[in-house]
Image: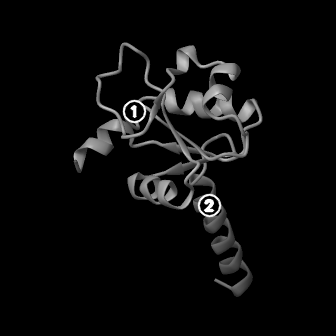
Amino acid sequence: LNTKIMRAIFVFCALLLFGLAFSADAMVRIINRVQLVEIRKQMLTAVVIDSRSNKDFDNITIPGAKRLPVDRMTEEALAAMVPSKSNPVIFYCHSITTNASGEAASKASSWGYTNIFRYTGGISDWVVDK
C-alpha cells in the first residue's frame, strides 16, 4: 500500500479509537476504576453519583458517593448536589450491562453540565478489588 492510503487508514483507526472513549453523548467521558480514583484525587470538587434505582440498590456504594436514582433525577435534584455545571460529576450504576449511569449522564449533558464522566464498570467492578 502506498503512504497516502496507509496514512488514511491510520487516521481512520485513530479517530475510531478516540470515538470509542466517549459515549454517544460527546460530552460524557467513559472511565474505569483507576481513572475514577485518580479523578477524585486530582479534582477535589468531583461529585460521584450512584444512579441505580431503589430496586437495584443493595446498600453497597462507592465511599462518598451521593444517591440519585436516575428515575428520580430532575434538573433541580442534580443542581442541589452539583450546583456548578462545570464541576466534575461522575455517574455510575450496577455494571456495564445496565444503563442507569448512561441515562443520568445524558440528562446532565442536556441540562448543560460540561464535565461529565461515566464509570461503566459500576459497583460490580468497584467491589471486585475491595
Q: For this view, does 46 lie left or right of residue 27?
A: left
Q: How many marks?
A: 2
- Per the image, the residue denoted by label 2 is 18
Image quarter of residue 50: top left
Q: Type of residue at label 2?
A: Phe
Q: How is the image coloured?
A: one colour
Which numbered dot is residue 80? none
* Residue 65 coordinates in the image, percent (x, y): 44, 36
**Of residues 130 and 42, which is closer to you in this image?**
42
Judged from this view, the residue extending furthest toward the right is: 112
Which numbered dot is residue 97? 1
Residue at x 43% of width, y 31% of height: 93
Up-down relation of residue 77 to residue 125 (above or below)? above
* Residue 110 coordinates in the image, percent (x, y): 74, 31
**Of residues 130 and 65, which is closer to you in this image?**
65
Up-down relation of residue 19 to residue 14 (above or below)? above
**Secondary structure category for the residue under label 2:** helix
